[in-house]
Image: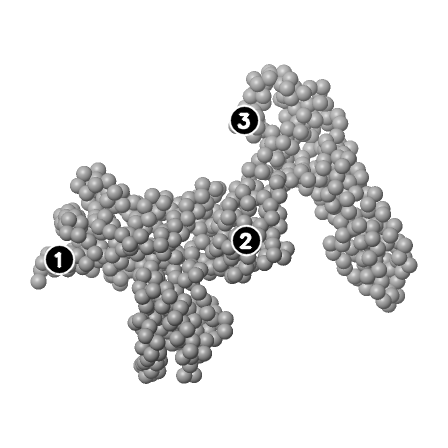
Amino acid sequence: MSAEATAISSVDTLAEQLSTYLDTPRINQVRRAYYYAEQAHEGQMRRSGEPYITHPLAVARILADMKLDHQSLMAAMLHDVIEDTGIPKDALSEQFGEPVADLVDGVSKLTQIEFRSRAEAQAENFQKMTLAMARDIRVILVKLADRLHNMRTLGHMSYEKRQRIATETLDIYAPIANRLGMHSLCTELEDLGFSFLYPMRSRYISKAVEKLRGSHREIIEEIRGKLEEKLNERGLPGRIIGREKHLNSIYNKMKFKHKSFHEIMDVYAFRIITDTTDDCYRILGAVHSLYKPLPGRFKDYIAMPKANGYQSLHTTLFGMHVNIEIQIRTEEMEQIANNGIAAHWLYKNDNSAVLEVSQRRVDRWVQGLMEMRERADDSLEFIEHVKVDLFPDEIYVFTPKGKILELPGGATPIDFAYAIHTDIGNACVACRINRNLGSLSQPLQSGQTVEVITAPGARPNPAWLSFVVTGKARSSIRHFLKYQKKAESLELGKTLLKKSLAGFDYTLSQIDEAQRQRVCDHNQAASFDDLLSDIGLGNRMAYIVARQLVSDPGGDSGGSERPDDRGIVNIEAGGHGRGSMTIRGTEGLLVRFASCCKPIPGDPVVGVMESGSGMVIHSDTCRKLPDKDADRSALTPLKWAKDITDEFSVELRVELERQRGVIAEVASAISLADGNIERINVEEQNARLSIVSLVVHVNGRRHLARVMRRVRNVRAVTHIARVRH
């Protein structure tokens, strides 16, 4: 039979397959798309030597196996037409309508994506893929089917191409298929990717599986027989299928879970497919009466579906000296488990509630991707967030009202807060886990009820970035901090500039717009706000900008600035402005307290501007500050606000005689003076004396004096002093 005749018989076979779920006019539209594509690809061949049209036809067949709608099948037939034959999108639009042309255009754009180039290019392309998915999820379904057929025929490619495409499949496409709940397609992509990336390992595992299966056949048949007998005895409908372990999954369990091949294969897996959800639970009872269930191995994904819409009951039994894994689900759940979001088109006419939930989850996921895309600073940051969401090992937690939220394994209460709403995450200050106060950084466990406590005016803590795991939480925190830093640098810059202008007997309102613009141009700043931000960040000196603002437009632009070897910016010529800047200790990201001298309210303090990171507050007597008066002119005089209630860390060194219970006595003395101990460290000096290093929280010098007096009164204490490095 000629290639042409084979293709025609294949399109007839496809039409026959489609007649099981599509009407004749729709099947004819698919046929029309096929003939159009055949003409367009006339004379083009694949690497295997077959006519090119065999590829689009194979892609359409994969989608037909999933019972996808006629527009997706038409797009499958035409998916390479724009890319390979130069036919424009408008021509397709005229012939087959806007939706089909949009799908083909979307798939063409994804086909141009080369993921394994540089990391940045890969990330850029992932963004394009997200946009395509957001417009129409079917674009990615056609692309996944296209990738599957290419993987099935990858053997004809060069070694380098095989490696690149297999890696890309395992990194990007298989996880997306998994996230969309398309289990069958995902496992085939994984197994093919694995076999091309590691051909030797794949062959070795495949042979070992075949050998083992032969010797296990009797046990498998015996277990199946007993299960069937039990269902018949109870009058329960259900077909029993043996479940195959996939090569890639065996390899990953051996590699990452450090399990031996025999440990993995000594589990016998079955799936029981029945009619209704009620039957699922009845069958569960029946199998539990046949073999003993293993404690802690039962999972109810019917009541709590996975993030990708998957539903099933999972139980592990112990019988006939082996472990037996059983999944129980309905026909509809089986369709969704295998085809995920693709099953949506199959059940579209049934108004299936399960599918609606599944569709909502996918919509929510794609919507979440779009939000992250808007927030991310760059495409690399975006892909870092998305990869977390593509490999979720889910946990399920409850809101206080009983709503279920799925989160990736390792998620914390902060991730939970952001999953509810960005504003709740931003204002989170504490949480209750199962009604008890819990730590914001502790990983949550499935089944816990989490309540988020918020406070008006609260803001995300930069430390959260070290433990959050969801892309949404990470991108929201970074986004907030970026804008907070901008706002704070602007505010701090304005304060410092006003103070410097006061030294020249000027106020900011006296500087007209033209002069501001001249100074901006001179400093190559895009706007006056940018200039203020730069002052706040420590990148420019307030004094020099002030002098430029008050000097004659045509005159000297005043002064030069140069960082000295301590990173402190010096001013050549001129003194500083009058008065001091007031600090409260809660200024945020750009005003920090030096860890060397740990200043507290009441200590004389000065500010040092550090390039790019704002102001660091030092004690006036700190050894790290410059000695020369000329150098000290760069320091900002500061004064403390009157009503500070915040706590500050102070280090104390206590010498004491060694006695039983003396450390407890010192701790008790500190607490009687309302001090909080952050850290205590005992250094043994000799058999008679010990030195204790303490870090205590106090709210000022008076409070510190009270704490030190109490400690001094402990009889064993011979000396106490505040440590300043």
Q: Nearer the viewer, residue 695 or 501?
A: 695
Can you identify the residue that label 2 sits on?
A: 400
Q: What amino acid type should be assigned to the residue bearing mark 1?
A: Asp
Percent of width and height locating residue 103: 27, 45
Instruction: Say which label, 3 or 1, has the lower sequence index.
Output: 1
Q: Where does the N terminus fall, quadrant-wise?
A: bottom left
Q: Secondary structure at mark 3?
A: loop
Note whether 596 is above or below 679 in the view shown: above
Q: Secondary structure at mark 1?
A: helix
Q: What amino acid type should be assigned to the residue bearing mark 2?
A: Pro
Residue at 83% across, 53% down = 672
Residue at 28% across, 54% down = 350
Q: Visible in this render: residue 50?
A: no
Residue at 47% across, 43% down = 376
Q: Nearer the viewer, residue 681 or 333?
A: 333
Can you identify the residue that label 3 sits on?
A: 527
Count neighbours of disc 3 (C-alpha within 10 A) and say few if under 14, some if 14 to 19, many if 20 or more.
some
Mark pair 2, 3: CA separation? 48 Å
Q: Secondary structure at mark 2?
A: loop
Task: Tell me where residue 389 sits by quadrant.
Answer: bottom left
Q: Is residue 382 shown left or right of residue 551?
A: left
Task: Tell me where residue 379 sits by quadrant.
Answer: top left
Instruction: Say which label, 1 or 2, has the lower sequence index.
Output: 1
Count neighbours of disc 1 (C-alpha within 10 A) and say few if under 14, some if 14 to 19, many if 20 or more.
few
Can you identify the residue that label 1 sits on?
A: 12
